Amino acid sequence: MLKEESGYIRDLSTGNHKAFDYLFLQYYPKVNYFIQHIVKSREAAKDLSQDIFEKIWINREQISQVESFNSYIFRMAKNSALNYLEHLQIKSEYETSYQYHDNKLSIEEEIDIRDLELLIKLVVESMPAQRKKIFKLSREQYLKNKEIADMLNISEKTVKNHLTLALKEIREAILVALLIFFHFN
């Protein structure tokens, strides 16, 4: 049997498909079972086993230098399974880390958004009555400039001017807040 197998290995190294088929039929079920026992996944074991035989075919010219094909293929199977498990571990750690940082950023962003909304609210409340009313109609009730002008019996140009001034005040307040933030951090 060993002598016969060494003949198949020699023939495989010359590119003989029948020799490859023989070795595949002899070893694939054992290799697949071995890997499946390690990785605990039928699909992963199937993929890894096929990859091993693909590598054997690609590197067939060097296979004749192998003293024990059985040891060689099971060493490949063990390394392949352990690499797969290591990859899963790294992937799991990355996903856990990513989720942690993603959640952490979301909380920080949520706080920043609330702070910004509060700042805008304070700026709007400190505006002159007419400007505050126009800004709220525009931004909270989503009315168009013409609708606001008609409602308040003023020109569209006056509405536009009040909105421009309101946005300018808000931008200035945000700029000051950012300068203070960066100055103290």
Image (tube, grey):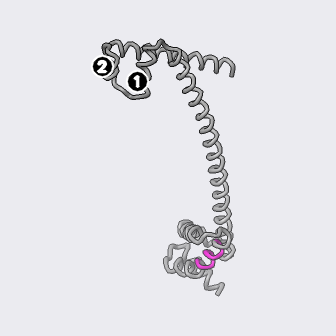
Residue 67: quarter of image:
bottom right
- The quadrant of the rendering that contains the C terminus is top right
- Residue 150 covered by magenta stretch: no
Where 3 falls versus 183 (above or below)? Answer: below
Q: Can residue 50 be seen in this view?
A: yes
Where 122 falls versus 56 (above or below)? Answer: above
- Residue 80, which numbered label? none
Label the magenta part by its dominant secondary structure: helix
| x then y, percent, for residue 118 | 57, 25
Q: Nearer the viewer, residue 4 or 146?
A: 146
Q: How many labels does the image show?
A: 2
| x then y, percent, for residue 31 | 62, 75
The residue under label 1 is which amino acid type?
A: Leu
**Bounds of the magenta segment:** 28-35
Residue shown at 56% from the left, 72% from the top: 13
Q: Residue furthest bottom?
A: 1
